[in-house]
Image: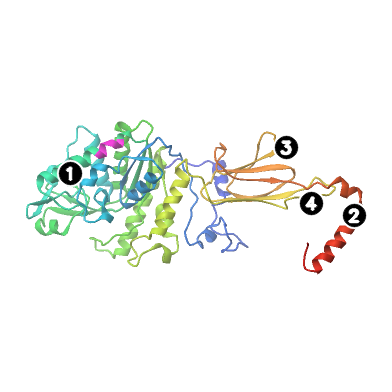
Amino acid sequence: MSSPITTTEARRNFVSAYSRWHQKGALPAELNGTLACQRLCEQLFTPAISPGFKLQPEDGVFAIGSCFARGIEWALVGQGMEVLSRAVEFDSFPAINDELKLGFTNKYNTFSIYNELRWALDPNTEFSRNSIVHVGNGTFYDPHTTPALQPGDFDETLRRRELIRSVTRRISKCRVVVITLGLVEVWRDKTANVFINQVIPDMLSLYPDRYELHVTNFADNLSNLEAIHALLKQFGHHDVRIIVTVSPVPLMATFSKEDVVVANTYSKSLLRAVAQEWAAKHENVYYFPSYEIVQNSDPRLTWEEDRRHVKGQVVQHIMRLFLRNYFSGVPVTSAMLSASPNPVPRGNDLGKSTISWFCHGAPDAALYVSRNGAEEVLFAKRPHGSQELSKIETDVTLYDAFDRKNRLAQISVTRPSLSPIIASKPDRVRFWRRTNRAQMKDGGLR
């Protein structure tokens, strides 16, 4: 159970720009609105994300889990990060096709993720060799990989297994670990007494009594994640940070008696709740809402015709949001800062201007002001709003956080000064205005 929230913190959360679904008088289609009813009108949904840390260029990263982990690998490699789960050693593995080149490294359930890590990290745990099965014609299948990898003979299968273990061991050098949760339907090998990653039809035909299906529950999956956390604490990086996500890709089919849509809803809902609980229990575990981004984007833009695979445009949107929030080298790009009026008209009073600002992906955004080059002072602490500024000749700067390391936008609020020559000769001012109006009637200034 997560820790209780104090009244002060709850009230602060309640007035957050992203805390409300709707409010009276709000226009659902308002551009850059922060109400849920407004953001859900956008074609690509953008949730408020509060990253608990930033990836540094020198960090090692290891991604494990379902296909979202592969997307993170590609995105971070593109930023020049060291991604140790994307190993060149795997280039020699005969994949079914180029699209699934690293698909054999996918781990679809928490049991298989835990197994892979304990076999690699714990010296007192050995890989279950008798879980490798003969599938005919002298070929063997390692059920802790996926069918994306072509079967080989027994020695070749063991060689690949040892290479996978060697690469997985590199997670101990990585400060950042990304774990993606996929399924709750898990097969258990009764002969080897081990849960596996994925079955293939030949296995069930050749060994009809060897395997049993488990529709796992909340406690099963949380227990596995807790065991994974203990492994990484004992054998991993001393400052390890874990990002957990839930894959939005639905079940291809269900082995349970439920309608596949009902079974998929149960699977994703349970894993989403487990991820939240796990993140709440540990200060170094953070949830990234890739599942919510997909589910709340326009379905016509989100899904391929099979309504199962996510289109590339949405995947790119997710990767941009991930990099924007977690990678220190990528700034928030969706930001707006304005002042109205600006310049402020001259008058007898000191002058006022309304400052309006908005930014996605930076819930800790802060506005600072500086007058005549003086030290900046805090003006507002929220990612969206409008507030009156009573001091003119002021620089207003929007930052993504209170530490002011990343500037998103800046404007200067000014008041025009009158030329002393024009001010001292009102006849010239009236003459210029008359001449200007006459020229405009003739077709414009010359």
- Which residue lies under the disc numbered 4? 345
- Distance between the alpha carbons at the discs numbered 3 and 1: 66 Å
Q: Please state which of the two labelled residues, at mark 4 or mark 2, is closer to the viewer.
A: 2
**Circle 2 sits in a helix, a strand or a loop, which is it?**
helix
- Circles 4 and 3, Cβ within 8 Å, touching? The answer is no
Magenta span: 167-171
- Distance between the alpha carbons at the discs numbered 4 and 3: 19 Å
Answer left or right for 276 relative to 411.
Answer: left
- Distance between the alpha carbons at the discs numbered 4 and 1: 74 Å
Q: Please state which of the two labelled residues, at mark 3 or mark 2, is closer to the viewer.
A: 2
**Circle 4 sits in a helix, a strand or a loop, which is it?**
loop
User: Mark 2 packing: few (<14 Cα in 10 Å), some, or many (20+)?
Assistant: few
- Which residue lies under the disc numbered 1? 160
Going by the numbered disc 1, the residue's amino acid type is Arg
- Circles 3 and 2, Cβ within 8 Å, touching? The answer is no
- Which residue lies under the disc numbered 3? 372
Going by the numbered disc 4, the residue's amino acid type is Pro
Q: Please state which of the two labelled residues, at mark 1 or mark 2, is closer to the viewer.
A: 2
- Which residue lies under the disc numbered 2? 428
